[in-house]
Amino acid sequence: MTKGRGVVVLFLILVITGCGHGGNSGARNVLTVSVPASSSCNILNAPCVSVTICSPINGSCRTIPDILVDTGSSGLRVFSSLLNLNLLPASDGSGLPIGECVVYVDGSAEWGPVRIANVILGNEPSVTVPIQAIESSFAGGPSPSCGTVRLLNAPGNGVTNGVLGIGIFQYDQSLYFSCTSSACVAINPNPLLSLPASSFVQNPVFLLPTDNNGVILSFPSIPDTGARSVSGTLTLGIGTSSNNQPGNGVLLYAATPVGALTTVYGGTTYSSSVIDSGTNVFGIPSDIPINICTGVNAGFLCPAVTMVLTVANQASNGSEPSVAINIANMDNVYNSNFGVYNDIAIDSPAGWGFFFGFPFFLGRTIYFGYDQQPTPLGTGPFYAY
Amino acid sequence: MFFLICLIVPAKSALAVLGEGKKSVELDHQTLHGDRMSIPRAGYSIETIQSAGLTIKEYLAPNGTIFAVTWEGNRFPDLVTLFGAYYNEYQQASDIYRKQTKILHGAFHLTSSRLVVQTAGRSPHLRGRAYLPSYLPPGLPLKDIE
């Protein structure tokens, strides 16, 4: 009897310690996030996960690592060369395949067809969802309607294997095109009016059976001098399970239709701020005078000593709780062995507000409430922490 | 249908050029068929050109020189034409930037010897600002250019 119980206890210990050591923890709705991960997610302050993508035609699957967790976009996009799966084409309503172009801040762009895939996040049930297969040569390319861009054709050199857009809005409304095998015509001005919703690249979390009303990102604190790497969690759903109930004292910050919130600093109100895991620095409005680095770190901020900015975001309950953010001197704090910093920043035009990029996520649990979805904290779109 | 395509295809030599005169703004308007609006300000003026999904603002000094450009929308404007003589140094600075390890995502700041370029977001909500520091009207705060 006693011996039998011992075996059971040992078995349980093995099961429990086994949890959390894989790419995803044992819970249905929790994904392990590595910052930065190795290989193609080896970018400063880049949070990455693994995602499993399967063919709806023959059921074959691939697990793709090094996919950027991006709360500033919607939908999954992965390099086609890594997928190598038989996926279904999304149609523009008249039977033509759709291409999509997503442009990034450095003028680069991800171009490729919209494909229907079965996507598995953590241990959730598979969802059938349109994704973008990044493929620079698709249909002869989108040029010139994407603007002057450098089409990305492979991961590496600052480009991750893909992007998992888990932002607060369901549909990605970037540039869509109707394509033949050799040419594409832009679908504009408002793709939402011209394309079936089932053809939009979209946030797969919205399609989950239960954990579909938002996500929670949680990361440990790190020293102000930086860290080699950290590991955090992406939890799907808010208040939908025992492991995603909002903690006490979490405040809701309503987001505008473009995902903005309002920040107050030094008597000035900035109405265009964002909280974004896919931005890897703080963006500080340039009317706050801070030295900008010259030389190898040009563009980053280089105050003589670390500055502490006490800023306040306007919560929906009318309060303006302040948070302190540190801005380090990039020349001093940067260490080529380290991949995570809680205090690196660039300056940005004052009217663009504050960017609470990945440094803001360290030592915090941040809730992203999805557009029109009810949660125990309120109905989205919102940020909460 | 053809009309729509015209609106969203940024034709080459469509855009006004940094460091050059107002004539290029007029070329812009003609080529883009976008809605154009001129806003006078103390010591400078802003020409706004709006086409499907993209708004471009060009900042003109009293002598007609374009000293800054901002944009907002689902894509970049045609930077080759927009930056004109400054495009090469922008390109060189971009190439150097891409070889280093501190790649920026989501928000971006690039400085070359004569040009500052700042961008943020990703499509469909991209924002950009490019200006020539040495051409700024005296006393004009940068926060007025956005």
Image: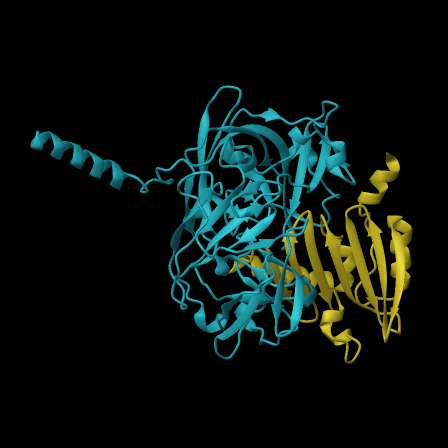
Tell which chain the image draws in cyan: A
Which of the 4 image quadrants contains residue A154?
A: top right
Question: From what the image shows, is residue A304 above or below residue A124?
Answer: below
Which of the 4 image quarters holds residue A230? bottom left
Q: Quadrant of residue A129?
A: top right
Q: Position of residue A100 (x, y in %)?
A: 67, 38
Vertical side of B60 occupied by B82: above or below: above
A334 relative to A15 in the view: left or right: right
Q: Quadrant of the N terminus of chain A?
A: top left
Q: Position of residue A185 (x, y in %)?
A: 77, 34
Residue found at x 40% / y 50%: A232
Which chain appears yellow? B
Residue A160 seen: no
- Residue A179: percent from left, percent from top: 72, 30
Residue placed most toward the observer, B8 or A238: A238
Task: Spot the residue most to the top.
Answer: A58
Residue shown at the point (65%, 29%) measured from the top left: A198
Q: Is residue B87 left or right of residue A49?
A: right
